[in-house]
Structures are given as C-alpha cells and as structure tokens.
Image (spheres, grey):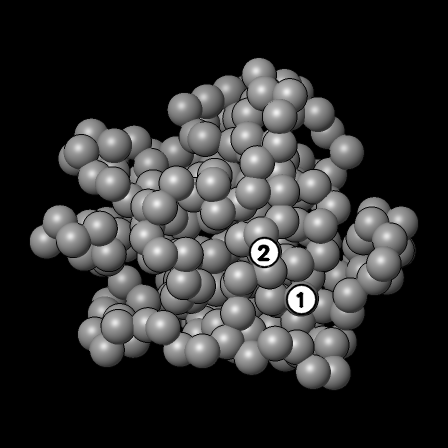
C-alpha cells in the first residue's frame, strides 16, 4: 500500500463509527500471501453483509432495483465504486474495462463491476461517460442511498442519516478518498478493500498485472 493510501485510510479511521460490526475472517489461508493481494488489498475490519443487502439500479435500461448480492450473482467479484466527478476514478476506468474484458475472454466466472455512487448523474449519462473513456463494456450499476451509507461504514467514514451529498464535510473526505474498491468471493464474503487508485508507488496499475488476473481465476476455482 502506498504512503498516500495509508494516510487516507488513517484519516478515515479517525472518523469511524464507534463500534461497527466486526467481520469474521472468512478468507482462505493462502489469500494473504498471494501476490495479487499482498501490498494491494487491505484486510476488511467489518462485515460486508449489510452492503450486500442494500439495493442498487443494475443498469441504465432497468427500472427495477436489486440487492447487491443479486447483482454479484454468486461470482467472485471486484466492485469498483466511482463517481463522474472523481478524476482518480475516471483514470481507472479504461484499465478496469480491459481487466474485465480479459476475464471474459478467458471464460472466467470472476468479474469486475463498476458502481456509481455519491453522484447525481443518471445511469444513461454515466454510461455515455464510460463510453467516452473507452470503457463502454464495463458493467455499471448505481448505488441507492442505503448502499452509499453501508460503503461509508465499511471504509470507516462517519455515518450520516442523510445522503452524503448533503454533508459537505463527508463529501470533502470522499473527494480525497474515492475510488473505493471491494473484493468478494463467490459466497459474498468480503476478502479485501482498498481506498484510492489501485496503483503502486512506481505507477504500476493493478489491473494490468498478471497477479490480479491469477487471483481472480483462483477465486473462481479456475487455476
């Protein structure tokens, strides 16, 4: 983890809820030492169960909302939380789309999905933005407020009864912290989390590493 990401995570922890639900460690023993995890993913400190039970709009053509768990579809999944106003999120979209396409081309059950959050942009317009970024093929849903609040709890930000968009201080925090990235196994266990771009101090993109690809294939039982 880079120094910048550590500093952001520490700042987030300082604003954390006093006693969040502690996560039971459901990670397989090999995971922590895997090169696709080590130095890239932080160990979750609370359960992702609440987030899985929140709802989202699954696509620009859908009027029916689904739970996050349904959206993941029982597959190993990376959830990349983004906003159209977030430059680091925008910078990640093309390499994320390339990574997603690589998994699809390999016939993998593992997937990467984008989740628009903390943003008033409608999904059709967000999809146009992805297209302009060369990431039109990236699956993209839109978080409802309950999902936004659950994400704040996972990442250690102070929870607010109203939307984060109506809380200037929290929104300022998010401008320095997004993107949020989550790693789930096929059972919906939260295996890893990350604040900020998935880029090493040397500028190496996680999404273009063989280690990331191998990790997702292994989580899908394909290697």
Residue 73 percent coordinates (x, y): 39, 40
Identify whether 94 is placed above or below 211.
Answer: above
Q: How many numbered marks are there?
A: 2
In the rendered view, does 109 fall on the left or right side of 141? left
Q: Earlier in the sequence, mark 2 or mark 1?
A: 2
Q: Secondary structure at mark 1?
A: helix
Query: To which quarter of the image does residue 32 belong?
Result: bottom left
The structure residue drawn at horizontal position 57% and vertical position 36%, both measured from the top left corner, is: 66
| Mark number, residue 51 | 2
Does residue 49 appear in the picture of this structure? yes
The structure residue drawn at horizontal position 20% and vertical position 30%, both measured from the top left corner, is: 105
Q: Secondary structure at mark 2?
A: helix
Identify whether 104 is placed above or below 171.
Answer: above
The structure residue drawn at horizontal position 73% and vertical position 29%, both measured from the top left corner, is: 121
In the rendered view, does 167 fall on the left or right side of 39? right
Q: Quadrant of the N terminus?
A: bottom left
In the rendered view, does 52 fall on the left or right side of 83? left
Who is closer to the viewer here, 40 or 220? Answer: 220
Residue 18 percent coordinates (x, y): 74, 83
Does residue 203 appear in the picture of this structure? no
Residue 49 percent coordinates (x, y): 53, 62
- Distance between the Cα atoms at labels 2 and 1? 9 Å
**How many C-alpha atoms fall within 10 Å of the one at disc 1: few (<14), some, or many (≥20)?**
many
Extreme-left residue of the structure: 223
Who is closer to the viewer here, 24 or 79? Answer: 24
Query: To which quarter of the image does residue 94 belong?
Result: top left
The structure residue drawn at horizontal position 33% and vertical position 46%, both measured from the top left corner, is: 75
Residue 46 percent coordinates (x, y): 55, 74
**How many C-alpha atoms fall within 10 Å of the one at disc 2: few (<14), some, or many (≥20)?**
many
Query: To which quarter of the image does residue 155 belong?
Result: bottom right
Give the residue at mark 1: 153
């Amino acid at each position: 983890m880079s120094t910048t990401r550590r500093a952001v995570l520490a700042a987030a922890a300082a604003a954390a809820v006093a006693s969040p639900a502690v996560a039971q460690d459901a990670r397989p023993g090999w995971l922590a030492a895997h090169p696709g995890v080590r130095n890239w993913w932080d160990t979750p400190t609370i359960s992702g169960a609440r987030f899985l039970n929140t709802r989202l709009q699954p696509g620009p053509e859908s009027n029916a909302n689904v739970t996050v768990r349904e959206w993941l579809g029982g597959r190993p999944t990376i959830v990349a939380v983004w906003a159209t106003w977030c430059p680091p999120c925008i910078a990640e979209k093309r390499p994320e789309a390339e990574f997603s396409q690589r998994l699809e081309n390999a016939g993998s059950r593992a997937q990467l999905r984008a989740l628009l959050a903390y943003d008033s942009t409608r999904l059709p317009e967000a999809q146009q933005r992805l297209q302009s970024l060369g990431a039109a093929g990236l699956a993209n849903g839109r978080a409802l407020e309950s999902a936004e609040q659950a994400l704040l709890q996972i990442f250690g930000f102070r929870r607010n009864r109203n939307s984060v968009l109506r809380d200037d201080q929290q929104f300022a925090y998010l401008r320095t912290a997004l993107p949020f990235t989550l790693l789930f196994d096929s059972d919906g266990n939260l295996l890893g989390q990350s604040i900020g771009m998935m880029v090493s101090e040397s500028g190496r993109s996680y999404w273009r590493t063989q280690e990331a690809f191998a990790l997702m294939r292994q989580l899908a039982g394909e290697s």
